[in-house]
Amino acid sequence: MCGIVGYVGRRQAGPVLLNCLGKLEYRGYDSCGIAVSSGDLVVYKDAIRVKALAETLPRSIEGKAGIGHTRWATHGEPSQVNAHPHCDCTGRIAVVHNGVISNFQKLREQLSGEGHHFVSETDTEVIPHLIEKYYAGDLAKAVELALGEVEGSYAIAVLMSGESRLVVARKDSPLIIGIGDRENFIASDVPAILDYTSQVLYLEDGDIGVVTPGGVEVSQHGKVVRRERHTISWTVEDAQKGGYEHFMLKEIHEQPKVIRDTIGGYVSAAEPPAHLATMGDISLEEILILACGTSYHAALIGKYLMEELFKVAVRAELASEFSYSGRASSVSRAIVITQSGETADALKAIRKLKGEGCQVIVITNVVGSTASRLADQTVYTRAGPEISVAATKSFIAQLMALYWLALPYAKIDIRRLDGLVMELRQLPGKVQRVLDSEATISEYARQLARCEDVFFIGRGINFPVALEGALKLKEISYIHAEGYAAGELKHGPFALLGRETPVVAIVAQDNTYEAMLTSIKEVKARHSPVLALAEEGDEVVGEVADSVITLPRVDALFSPVLNAVALQLLAYYTARERGCPIDFPRNLAKSVTVE
Ligand code: M6R
């Protein structure tokens, strides 16, 4: 999705902007550009990568204030003319924008009638023209008046020729200001500015900020407001590959630490009796969990987990569908899971829930994200920045947060609870053992890489893991993959099975075990090769499946963690074998900030 950066200070802005834009590449983009104020405004942009843009720039662009953008096309194809920054008629005002201006057609017609000339197909271009229209010597005032006409969502940064300040504003799209020493930064995302500062302000909806080298002034409806300064705990190293070939592989390998960090807040290091920090009084009468994509798969695992532990019905729904339901959510408390905290569908769901008077607990990885600020309570996962588009460590951290939410309220025998807590403590070590079997998994991946279609099957709490395994494989290797509840294969997909269509079967030691063995036999009878994931010591699976990835023994409630890690490695090595651009898969964005 689109990314914004901005700089004003003591350095030359061009190299800073390019460096910051490079750090936003992981969000996914198709074009990029910068504008620098060097007396006049100079704008360089195209439908190319940031590195290529850097190569086309003149050696030195003088100017210590500038803005930059990575664009993920929504209105108009990726092209030089549609790339940001966009300018007004005079070429004195440049704007970068994230979000969608919903009334841009009407504004464009109106402005065209007033003599403004448009060159792009974008919704964004109306903004510099509106600012031009209202400019009477005070840029911040002109921005405020312009935004008064705009409907939709935006995070914008505005630069004017000859000025050593930036004007920024946000509504329903994230924007942060990085505070430096006689220099300040703007970004849509923390990793962009980590090279320069760890001090940030989060803008609120409706804020307009004026950013100069020496300070930041934020106002709402013309009144100056104070925004608290936060220190970011993520380090530059967290956002670098650290010797791994891809961010995804690094992030997969970070998972033992991520588990330790995320559960560290609630599982005491002491031996039993187990001490669990709780979230206070959570009504367990009715539970609704909403999320999208991989986070939705975590939500589904949460559903199975809570139903098992609480013995009550739990609903897990797609946030992207939730808004279209005719009925009210009819819950008093809901959990929304979003790694980025900026997914448009998740935010829309939170707003709908809150509109119904529902209390919302958000599970997110990003401190200060929009979701966390809308939430009544936030559970932060401690995964650190996740750069690869494919979610891995953030997913495992979400599962840890769900265990946290669930375990203290479990209607189970205290000895069973102690046993589960003990297992939680041992999880990092067991995940490490899965990682240690990387070489074996990569051998299976080599075979999978030759296939065109793959099915993943699981039952019970591992059915969502089958969905996640399929999603991981398809998004990074471009192999068609489908996740199915094992019992559903015979209700249609059997027609697709055959020697060329392998099935990955997740076999857990729970009440689904026998049925999974039956499913494998049914698949084998249709000649599909079966790769099973099974616990060590299980001799039976090896007799029915063609090959087996053996995983450490674990309580079945935690088996999704080990199975998911194994499937992440399987997807990674399959994509690598096929030479895919693993960290930045085609057409995908890290945080999906449009509906
Ligand atoms: O930031 P979110 O957790 O709200 O993102 C939701 C999905 O876009 C995301 O989980 C996506 O499915 C993954 N990046 C896929 O690996």
Image (cartoon, rainbow, N blue to C red):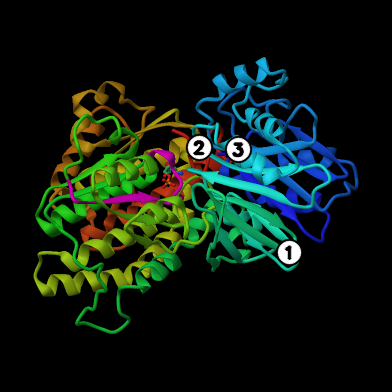
Residue stretch in magenta = 331-345
Residue type for callout 3: Leu
Regarding mark 2 in the picture, which secondary structure is present there? Answer: loop
Pointer 3: residues within 10 angstroms few (<14), some, or many (20+)? some
Mark 3 or 2, closer to the camera: 3
In percent of width and height, residue 467 lies at 32, 40
Pointer 2: residues within 10 angstroms few (<14), some, or many (20+)? many
Q: Residue at x 47, y 54 (%)?
A: 369
In percent of width and height, residue 242 lies at 62, 62
- The answer to whether residue 29 is magenta is no
Which image quarter holds the N terminus? top right
- Which disc, if any, is residue 145? 3
Residue type for callout 1: Gly
Mark 3–mark 2 distance (CA, rounded to whole Å): 16 Å
In percent of width and height, residue 566 lies at 39, 52
Regarding mark 1 in the picture, which secondary structure is present there? Answer: loop
- Which disc, if any, is residue 100? none
